[in-house]
Image (tube, grey):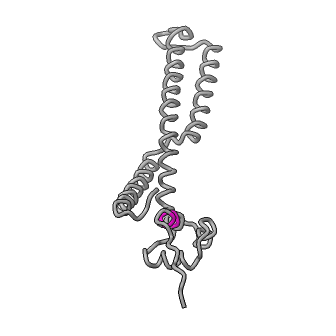
Amino acid sequence: MSTTPRKKVPAKIKKEARKLFESGMDMYDVAIELKLNINTLYNLSSKEGWEKGVLSELLYMKEQEILTEKIAERRVDRMETYRVLTKGVTDIAAASQTTLRNGKVILDMEGSIALANHAKAIQTNFMIEKELYGIMSPSQELELSVQRMKYEELKRKLDVSNNEGDIEL
C-alpha cells in the first residue's frame, strides 16, 4: 500500500494565514480565504502558537496614528488661521473704530455691534472646528499619549517576532 506524499503549505501562505488569524479573522474565514483545509490550519496554529486577535489592537493603533497625524497637520493650519482672525479683530478695535473720551477707548455704536458680531462669528467657528479637528484638552492629550505608548510596546513585540521570521505586515 503506497501513500501519496503530503502537500506542504508554502511558507508565504502560512505567514498570510497567521497574519489574517492574528488580526482577528476567524479560522474558518481564513481557510476559505486561502483555500486551505481547516484542520491543516488548526494543526499549524497549535504547532506555531498562533493567538487570535493579537494584531488587531496593533492594526487599530496604527490606523489611529495615521489619522492623528493628518488631523494634527490640519489643526496647526486652523489654529494659525484663528490667530490671524483674532489679531484682525484687535487691530480693527485699535484702529479706525475707536475714539477717545476722557482717556477711555470707546467704540461708536455701529462699530461696536459689527466688532461684537465679528468676534462672535470667530468664536462660533472656532468651537465647531475644535470638534472637527480634535483640538484636545490636556487630559485628552495625556490619554492619547498612553495609547501611543501601548502602541509602541506592541510594535516592539512585533519587531521581535519579525526578526524571528514569524510574521510579516
* Residue 163 lies in the magenta stretch: no
Q: Nearer the viewer, residue 159 or 94?
A: 159
Look at 42% across and 56% down and name the residue there.
151
Look at 50% across and 8% down and name the residue there.
100
Look at 49% across and 61% down and name the residue there.
57
Residue 160 relative to residue 99: left or right: left
- In the rendered image, the vertical position of residue 23 relative to residue 69, given as above or below: below
Number of labels in the image equals 0
- In the rendered image, the vertical position of residue 79 relative to residue 88, given as above or below: below
Q: Which of 138 and 47 is in front in this view?
A: 47
Residue 115 picture location, percent across and down: 60, 19
- In the rendered image, the vertical position of residue 145 relative to residue 89, given as above or below: below
Residue 86 relative to residue 148: left or right: right
Q: Give the magenta range.
A: 13-17
Residue 122 relative to residue 58: left or right: right
Residue 32 picture location, percent across and down: 63, 69
Specify the farthest residue to the bottom.
1
Residue 93 picture location, percent across and down: 53, 15
Secondary structure character of the magenta stretch overall: helix
Look at 40% across and 51% down and name the residue there.
145
Residue 134 picture location, percent across and down: 53, 42
Specify the farthest residue to the front.
1
**What quarter of the picture does the N terminus occupy?**
bottom right
Q: Nearer the viewer, residue 92 or 66?
A: 66
Q: Which of 3 and 100 is in front in this view?
A: 3
